[in-house]
Image (tube, rainbow, N blue to C red):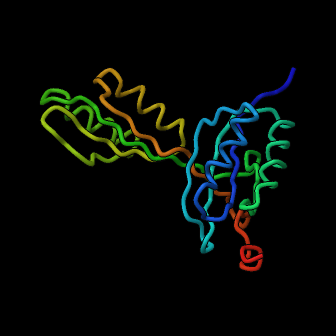
Amino acid sequence: MVDVESHTISVLVEDRPGVMNRVMSLFRQRGFNVDSIAVGHSEAPGLSRMTLVAQGDERRIEQLIKQLYKLLEVIKVIDVTSESLIQRELALVKVAANERTRGDIMRLVSEVYRARIVDAAPDSLVIEVTGPSEKIDSMLTLVRPYGIKEVARTGSVAMVRGSGAVAVSREEAIA
């Protein structure tokens, strides 16, 4: 039986229109469902970092990485799944709240999850929480009985701990 697991893939790409579409097309063509995607500027001018989380076995992920390198705008691709990672996600969660429940919700999310209340309305609270995806999932489970009105999640970003890096040198970026 093939061992399918969640893989975190970090991709450095040229910051140009259409690059994200080409990368995502490769995932789609190979039948991968992307669980999470986050894209932003990197430390190198003109380069963006994409962090993608997808399910797949080792062999299919290796093939995908080889295909990604065939895209001209792709500079570097690393499956960082087996590395020691710092992995975070941000979520904004709008929860139904009234005079009776407001204090309980505020205490619960601030003490247990170290989350912040970023907006308060007469009938709701907006909570900002950051951390591993499991922490966010756990908080959502705890506030669900109060009534979740809306959730917006960023997708996971990851960085290798210590001196390991997905970064490229200035020479690599220019080449």
Q: How many marks?
A: 0
Q: Looking at the picture, how far across and down is residue 136, in whole percent?
A: 46, 37
Name the residue rendered at 64%, 57% in the picture. 159
Q: Looking at the picture, how far across and down is residue 157, in whole percent?
A: 57, 51
User: For this rendering, which residue is in front, 71 or 125?
Assistant: 71
Rendered-image quadrant of the C terminus: bottom right
Name the residue rendered at 28%, 24% in the picture. 146
Above or below residue 44? Residue 22 is above
Occupied quadrant, residue 39: bottom right
Relative placement, left or right, of 136 versus 173 is left
Q: Looking at the picture, how far across and down is residue 170, in whole percent?
A: 71, 79
Above or below residue 47? Residue 103 is above
Above or below residue 71? Residue 54 is above
Relative placement, left or right, of 59 versus 25 is right
Rendered-image quadrant of the N terminus: top right
Occupied quadrant, residue 61: top right
Name the residue rendered at 28%, 41% in the picture. 126
User: For this rendering, which residue is in front, 128 or 168?
Assistant: 168
The furthest residue to the front: 18
